[in-house]
């Protein structure tokens, strides 16, 4: 591995986990797609997931191997079931996957306020062994961005800021760059400002110093846009750090304190916060059950995500959102209506808007080593699904796709 695929060695544990979650792959076909590049089409053996895998070959070695989500073939069909049959099918599927060590997490399915399915599988800790329960807290990764988007839209609803305000107008301490002068709040919410990411060697070298939005601005604030603001979509963790800084500037409160008061308390989310708790929080794990799971340190929540929640709290968030206790009808529409193309989906002012087996949903996912989650609301049918896992992508995404494709539309 070190000799032939050196660039993949740091990601080996995550790749083993992905393979285990999928149950292996069926090769559907492959073709050359560029100089020293081959693209293969795969299907998971255990789930409905399809992937594109791009293999880049160098001299006597593999330079890169990247998995990308892919749309199902035109002739692929999943039959929708009645509500009871869909729930029964999900329960059987999860029990089988958990028994074989391929799923650890919690799953909730509701219709409006009514919970139809709420179960837990696997372990939140393995030394000593601690089983997951429906009340276990999980890291939600980037799902936390949707809470911050609600905060920002609340402030817009109150007239304290506008979608057209620029970073420069809202953050006087931000360096006077082209990014600050051109990127607006709307660009940040829709990931269309070209603000880029912060993960990488620079973040790794300064991670201990980066705790607040101000810390991130000092470290990364001199960059220009990666592309002309508003020209396209490009997922940006740094953009949501800047939104956290804007919330602090406008309100005079720390971003997490404002979020707790104006989102979590209103929705009744008593188990949601930026930090892991000593008891009852699932430990993130990388690797696979077959080769040995490896515990990871707990993440610390940022405006861009990484906090902790439960399936019950996320259900409460969905109920509060749809009940217009967090936003009025107009600003709820801004949060939930598609605004900009984003690959195979679209993006609203804060949420992903996509389709599963013909049914439109809005929500958000979260992913990091040892973390995967999915939150989805289907406005046409009223169903809401929440999946949290202490394993990496696609452990939760597979489950969300499975039930989302089978519930009545």
Image: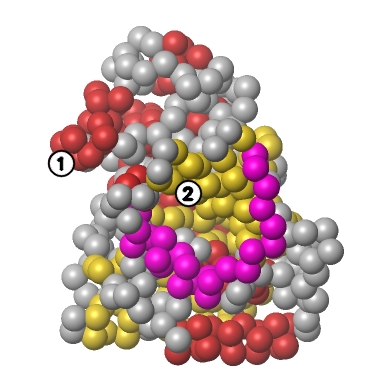
Please state the horizontal and vertical placement of residue 84, each as a whole percent of the image.
71, 88
Please state the horizontal and vertical placement of residue 165, each as a whole percent of the image.
51, 20
Q: Residue 65: which numbered mark, if any?
A: 2
Foreground mark, 2 or 1, reads 2
> Any magenta on residue 85?
no
Please state the horizontal and vertical placement of residue 360, each as a whole percent of the image.
74, 57
Side of 102 relative to 370 (left or right): right
Q: Secondary structure at mark 1?
A: helix
Occupied quadrant, residue 167? top left
Q: CA distance from mark 2 to mark 1?
A: 30 Å
Q: Nearer the viewer, residue 268 or 311?
A: 311
Q: Is residue 294 above or below residue 117?
A: above
Residue located at (72% from left, 88% from top): 85
Side of 50 relative to 300 (left or right): right
Q: Is residue 144 visible?
A: no
For label 2, the crowd category at 10 Å Cα-Cα, with few meaning under 14, some 14 to 19 and many 20 or more, is some
Please count the marks in the image.
Answer: 2
* For the residues bearing labels 2 and 1, Cβ distance under 8 angstroms: no
> Any magenta on residue 10?
yes
Q: Residue 292: which numbered mark, if any?
A: none
Please state the horizontal and vertical placement of residue 34, each as a whole percent of the image.
61, 35
Q: Is residue 102 visible?
A: yes
Q: Which residues are magenta?
A: 9-33
Q: Residue 208: which numbered mark, if any?
A: 1
Residue located at (80% from left, 76% from top): 79
Q: Quadrant of the C terminus?
A: bottom right
Q: Secondary structure at mark 2?
A: strand
Residue reaching furthest to the front: 60
Lower sequence index among marks 2 and 1: 2
Q: Quadrant of the N terminus?
A: bottom left
């Amino acid at each position: 591995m070190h000799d032939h695929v050196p660039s993949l060695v740091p990601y080996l544990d995550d790749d083993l986990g992905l393979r285990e979650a999928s149950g292996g792959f069926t090769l559907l076909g492959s073709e050359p797609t560029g100089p020293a590049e081959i693209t293969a089409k795969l299907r998971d053996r255990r789930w409905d997931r399809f992937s594109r895998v791009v293999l880049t070959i160098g001299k006597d070695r593999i330079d890169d191997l990247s998995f990308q989500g892919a749309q199902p073939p035109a002739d692929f069909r999943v039959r929708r079931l009645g509500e009871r049959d869909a729930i029964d099918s999900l329960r059987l599927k999860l029990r089988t996957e958990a028994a074989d060590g391929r799923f650890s997490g919690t799953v909730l399915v509701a219709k409006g306020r009514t919970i139809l399915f709420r179960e837990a599988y696997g372990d939140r800790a393995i030394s000593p062994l601690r089983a997951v329960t429906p009340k276990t807290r999980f890291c939600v990764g980037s799902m936390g961005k949707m809470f911050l988007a609600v905060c920002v839209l609340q402030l817009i609803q109150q007239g304290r800021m506008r979608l057209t305000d620029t970073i420069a107008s809202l953050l006087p301490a931000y360096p006077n760059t082209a990014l600050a002068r051109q990127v607006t709040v709307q660009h940040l919410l829709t990931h269309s400002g070209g603000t880029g990411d912060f993960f990488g060697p620079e973040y790794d070298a300064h991670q201990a110093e980066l705790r607040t939005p101000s810390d991130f601005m000092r470290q990364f604030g001199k960059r220009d846009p990666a592309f002309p603001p508003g020209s396209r979509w490009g997922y940006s963790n740094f953009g949501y750090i800047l939104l956290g800084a804007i919330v602090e500037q406008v309100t005079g409160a720390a971003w997490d304190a404002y979020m707790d008061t104006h989102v979590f308390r209103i929705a009744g989310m008593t188990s949601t916060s930026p930090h892991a708790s000593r008891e009852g929080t699932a430990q993130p794990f990388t690797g696979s059950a077959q080769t040995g799971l490896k515990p990871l340190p707990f993440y610390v929540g940022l405006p861009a995500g990484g906090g902790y929640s439960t399936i019950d709290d996320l259900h409460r968030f969905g109920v509060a959102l749809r009940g217009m206790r967090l936003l009025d009808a107009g600003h709820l529409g801004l949060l939930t209506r598609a605004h900009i193309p984003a690959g195979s989906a679209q993006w609203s002012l804060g949420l992903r808007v996509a389709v599963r087996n013909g049914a439109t949903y809005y929500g958000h996912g979260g992913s990091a080593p040892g973390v995967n989650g999915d939150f989805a609301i289907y406005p046409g049918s009223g169903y809401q699904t929440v999946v949290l896992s202490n394993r990496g992508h696609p452990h939760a995404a597979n489950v969300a796709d499975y039930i989302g494709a089978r519930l009545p539309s």
